Image: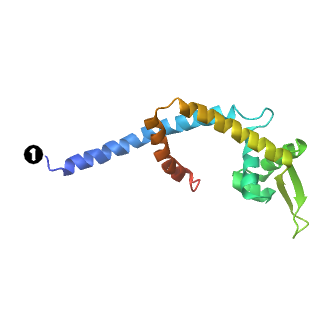
Amino acid sequence: MPSTGVRTEAKETNDEAEATPDLAASLRLAVMRLARRLRQRAEAGVTPSMLSAMSSIGRLGPLTLSGLATAEQVQPPSLSAIVGRLEQEGLVLREADPTDGRVARVRLSPAGRRLMERSRTRKTAYLARRLEVLSDEERDTLRRALPVIERLVEDGA
């Protein structure tokens, strides 16, 4: 019996739908393992939560604690403890808002900026070394996949 093409197209769609959870699981595992390897190259004594908060402060500029809590998607009390620790370590500075003295903003200190730069440099160097072991074709595949990966994390939802 000759195929109409409709059944084949429907079967391919079903196969793709069934493969999506497998792809999601494999991607999750690979991304988590890569993130763990990068975290292992972090500065001693600085937790991932501290680095994440510092990264948001560096990227978004001086922030109120509530603004930083929103950016980090954590509860304000948790963030307050993180910022307190960063202050103790001299990595952030808490300053009064120039337009409203009742509001405090946190910004990276010079030491915090240096730590972030060292951390980024160390992690980028690690990735560069790992990329060197890949073939030209594999690196090209990663280059083409980057916009797709970036789309996955665009809205954070």
Amino acid carrying label 1: it is Pro
Which quadrant is the C terminus positioned in? bottom right
Callout 1 crowding tier (Cα within 10 Å): few <14, some 14–19, many ≥20: few
Q: Which residue is mark 1?
A: 2
The reply to whether residue 50 is visible in this rendering is no
Q: Residue 96, position in %: x, y?
A: 90, 62
Q: Viewed as shown, does residue 153 lie left or right of 123?
A: left
Q: Which of the pair 147/24 is nearer the observer?
A: 147
Q: Residue 146, position in %: x, y?
A: 51, 47
* Furthest-top residue in this view: 133
Residue 37 placement: quadrant? top right
Looking at the picture, does residue 138 appear above or below residue 150? above
Q: Residue 149, position in %: x, y?
A: 51, 47
Residue at the spot 83% in from the left edge and 55% down from the top edge: 106
- State the SS at label 1: loop
Q: Which of the pair 21/34 is nearer the observer?
A: 34
* Furthest-bottom residue in this view: 99
